[in-house]
Image (tube, rainbow, N blue to C red):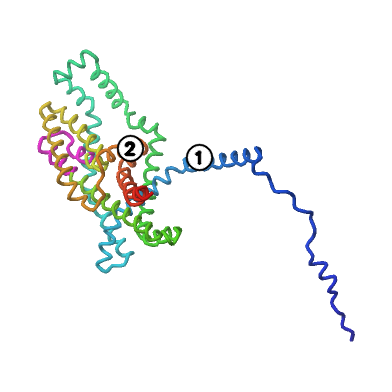
Amino acid sequence: MEIKKPNLKRERTAATPEVLGTKGAPLDRGHPFYFGFLAASGGVCAITLLRALASASQVFVLIIISLFLAAGLNPAVEFFRRRGLSRGTAVTVVVGIVLLLGGLIAWVVVPPVFHQVTALYHNAPNLIAELKHNSWIDKLNKNYGIIDSLQSKVTSSVKNGQFVVSAFGGVLGVGKAVISGAFSALTILILTLYFLASFPSVTKVAYRMIPASRRDRVGSLADAIVTRVGAFVGGQATVAVIAGIFAFILGHAMGIPYATALSMLVFVCGLIPLVGHLLGCTTMTLVALTKSPTAAVIAFLAYVFYVQIENYVVMPRIMKRSLSLPGVVTIVAALVGTSLLGLVGGILSVPIAAAILLILDEVVYPKAANS
């Protein structure tokens, strides 16, 4: 039987790549058209990215809040881990304690607060009218009609029942605000649980993106920032609780109307560094003014006295592990954060400023000194 030999010449010919022509000269990168096209493409990409980030800004805010809360609860998780619990069990215990305390506070505080806020809403015209009992305010009203104008607007809004509805942009706006708030709260809760449970693994993955020569240094700085942010969150929450308790005791001791609702407002304002107590003091003084000018002066002086005790006695003891900030930096950070993101920005601004100062002290200033 004859065996055919393979045609090596034909196989070599088939394996030879097809000749498609010779390479031309490279593009002239210095040509104006090339530069203009490249610059225009970069501008379009930058604008598209900025619009995408702007449209998803609410999502980024929720992520930042969740990271902030996770950093604040992480010291409590580490406390239970040092007692022998696994991270999952420690996270479950911490979240359970937080939810239990939140539910207890809601069960005890929400009904009277809701009742008093409703009463305050319906009695707002009468409270404004009582301001005219003060001779100085009555004289100001006779000259400029401020109280009468404010009273007429509030009375019409209360009688028509459109104040709350119009504040949210109509009936659909109210429903949208409720659904959006519930969805945001659920999202923050889920993200906080995820970040708490996987905090070490998330930071480990993030650190792997850093060059090995700088990984230890960056990791130490990041861990210090997370630790101080956590200390700040826990300390600020403690200070806010103390402020709310003070407002509750002061309001009931002086017989100020809607003392429970005011104490909750002071608690929320106490979460905002620096400028929060300004809002709380102003609100409490105005409500106390509806009772009498003397009550308003006493409430104002007592609140200012408490703020001094908080700044010089309570805050230094609670914030021992947090990064101390100069007063000017705290003021600027709080004002900028509040103007950008409102309440959330005011809460986040101070720890972010502390983190920036830590980076400046550890990285920027030494490099500038050695240059």
- Residue 338 is labelled as 2
* Residue 27 shown left or right of residue 87 in the figure: right
| Disc 1 + disc 2, Cβ < 8 Å | no
Pick whichever, 333 or 180, lies toward us: 333
257 part of magenta stretch: yes
Percent x, y for residue 112?
20, 41
| Mark 2 neighbour density, 10 Å: few (under 14) some (14–19) many (20 or more) | some
Does label 1 or label 2 sit earlier along the sequence?
Answer: 1
Say if 173 sits above or below 184 in the image: above
Instruction: Tell me which segment is drawn in magenta.
Output: 243-265
Percent x, y for residue 258?
18, 35
Give amino acid for label 1: Arg
- Helix, strand, or loop for circle 1? helix
Quadrant of the image occupied by residue 3:
bottom right
Q: Which residue is mark 1?
A: 51
Give amino acid for label 2: Thr
* Residue 22 shown left or right of residue 198 in the figure: right
Q: Main secondary structure of the magenta part?
A: helix
Q: CA–CA distance between discs 1 and 2?
A: 23 Å
Percent x, y for residue 138?
17, 17
* Residue depicted at x 75% and y 53%: 23
Quadrant of the image occupied by residue 116:
top left
Percent x, y for residue 89?
31, 65
* Residue 122 shown left or right of residue 52 in the figure: left
- Residue 177 is labelled as none
* Residue depicted at x 16% and y 47%: 314
| Count of residue discs | 2
Residue 102 seen:
no
* Residue depicted at x 22% and y 13%: 143
